[in-house]
Amino acid sequence: MNNHEKAALEARKKQTSLQSMYYNRYLIVRYITATLFFANLYWVILLVFSKSLFAIIPAILIIVMIPAMFEQIKLYSTPTNKVPYTKIFYFLQFFVNALIVISTSNNTFNYIYPFMNSTLLARLVIASFALLGIILCIFVEQRLKKISHDEDKHYQRIKQYEKSLQIHS
């Protein structure tokens, strides 16, 4: 390998490192999205087996989530700090979780969770998970806002790394 090839290889390594750093700005968002995907998937499966028409709720969440997931995957090849589909999904998930919390205090609970006993404990468990989902949605929305304004810690590290490489973008 001659010097020109070594320099080209080193430049590709640096570019790949930068690409990964930009992609990793959304790492926690991707993990939370995956967690919510499986939570909604299990919920829709249980509702389908219970023959409940309310299966449409988690099904819609999954359908809205699909473009958000593709948007997050696309970030590797096309870094951006704008993720509109992801924001829409998290807003909708927040709204549904808020409705779930409300449903735990009335008879709607029996329709949304027909596979569970309508005990106080069951209602508290579901309300707790829904509140956790609300907290995660708020956390992600705040993270996305910081990223969109380039105020996240990862962005500062990326800029320091670029400066150390003497790259200006």
Image (cartoon, rainbow, N blue to C red):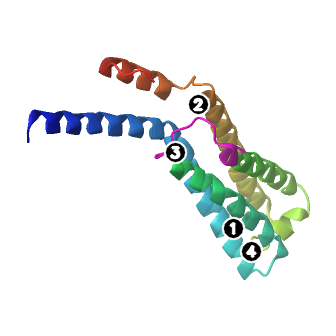
Dot 3 falls on a residue whose secondary structure is: loop
Mark 2 or mark 4, earlier in chain: 4
In magenta, the rendered stretch is: 76-87
* Three-letter residue code for mark 4: Leu
- Position above or below: 13 against 42: above
Dot 4 falls on a residue whose secondary structure is: helix
Quote the CA–CA distance across marks 2 and 4.
Answer: 36 Å
Q: In front: mark 2 or mark 4?
A: 2
Dot 2 falls on a residue whose secondary structure is: helix
Residue lying at 28% horizontally and 39% vertically, measured from the top left: 12
Mark 1 or mark 2, earlier in chain: 1
* Three-letter residue code for mark 2: Ile
Quote the CA–CA distance across marks 3 and 1.
Answer: 28 Å
Residue on which the image places disc 1: 43
Residue lying at 69% horizontally and 43% vertically, measured from the top left: 84
The magenta stretch spans residue 84: yes
Quote the CA–CA distance across marks 1 and 2.
Answer: 31 Å
Residue pushed farthest right?
Answer: 107
The residue closer to the viewer here, 26 or 22, is 22
Residue 166: x and y in percent read: 33, 18
Residue on which the image places disc 2: 147
Q: Residue 47 carries which label?
A: 4
- Position above or below: 96 against 161: below
Mark 3 or mark 1, earlier in chain: 1
The residue closer to the viewer here, 162 or 48, is 162
* Three-letter residue code for mark 3: Leu
Residue on which the image places disc 3: 75
